[in-house]
Image: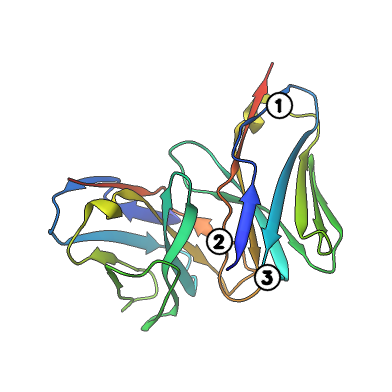
Amino acid sequence: SQKIEQNSEALNIQEGKTATLTCNYTNYSPAYLQWYRQDPGRGPVFLLLIRENEKEKRKERLKVTFDTTLKQSLFHITASQPADSATYLCAPSGTDKLIFGTGTRLQVFP
Amino acid sequence: DAGITQSPRYKITETGRQVTLMCHQTWSHSYMFWYRQDLGHGLRLIYYSAAADITDKGEVPDGYVVSRSKTENFPLTLESATRSQTSVYFCASSESRVPSEQYFGPGTRLTVT
């Protein structure tokens, strides 16, 4: 069955550093991959979409890569800020439904 | 402009009772979705709808019923609530099918005692 793995352990980094989150998937070949941010007690919010023919996508301080050979996406936040602290969900998809990972909690401390 | 709203935000019910969670969106999006979010499982799709009167099962549909008579509303009914249905439920909508981004509501925290 399709499986998505995100690091369940929280990632703690210092303000100003680059945070890198990993999303690995197995048993399918998604044509797209989305990243969402979720704050406690709130619904997820869309951040970025990357397609399988795009190796990299950027939006302000965010950068996403999509390696279909490794079956992996990396999500980078440069110059991280305490306000970036949240849980980040990846959602690879190939059909008409998204399949979400369990998310990685990022904590940026001053 | 409210966007997408869910009601109630919190609900406690007893095992065996029927409960309906409401979802309303003001964008006239074609697609609507219901997810549940549990620790260790992430977001799992229960049902989705591509348009009014068109619904389809997701990953975990058992014990749930949906309807969509109007584009803007997508209620989720638990016919006979069980403790395993204790969860946070999120409704979402999108303009078109994947990979269109999804807009999520604030969630309903449901506890079944």
Q: Residues within 10 Å of mark 2 (few under 14, many from 20)?
A: many
Q: Secondary structure at mark 1?
A: loop
**Residue in front for this viewpoint, B53 or A75:** A75
Q: Amino acid at mark 1?
A: Gln
CA gap, disc 3 and disc 2? 21 Å
Asked whether residue B103 appears in the rendered view, the answer is: yes
Q: Quadrant of residue B77?
A: bottom left
Which residue position holds label 3?
Answer: A28
Which residue position holds label 2?
Answer: B102
Q: Chain of mark 1?
A: A
Q: Chain of mark 2?
A: B
Q: Is residue A21 above or below residue B37?
A: above
Q: Do the residues indicated by labels 3 and 2 lie within the same chain of the protein? A: no
CA gap, disc 1 and disc 2? 25 Å
Q: Chain of mark 3?
A: A
Q: Amino acid at mark 2?
A: Gln
N-terminal-most mark, 3 or 1: 3
User: What colour-coding does the image apply?
Assistant: rainbow
User: Residue B6: image x %, image y %?
Assistant: 34, 54
Say which residue appears at 52% left-offset and 38% top-offset: A39
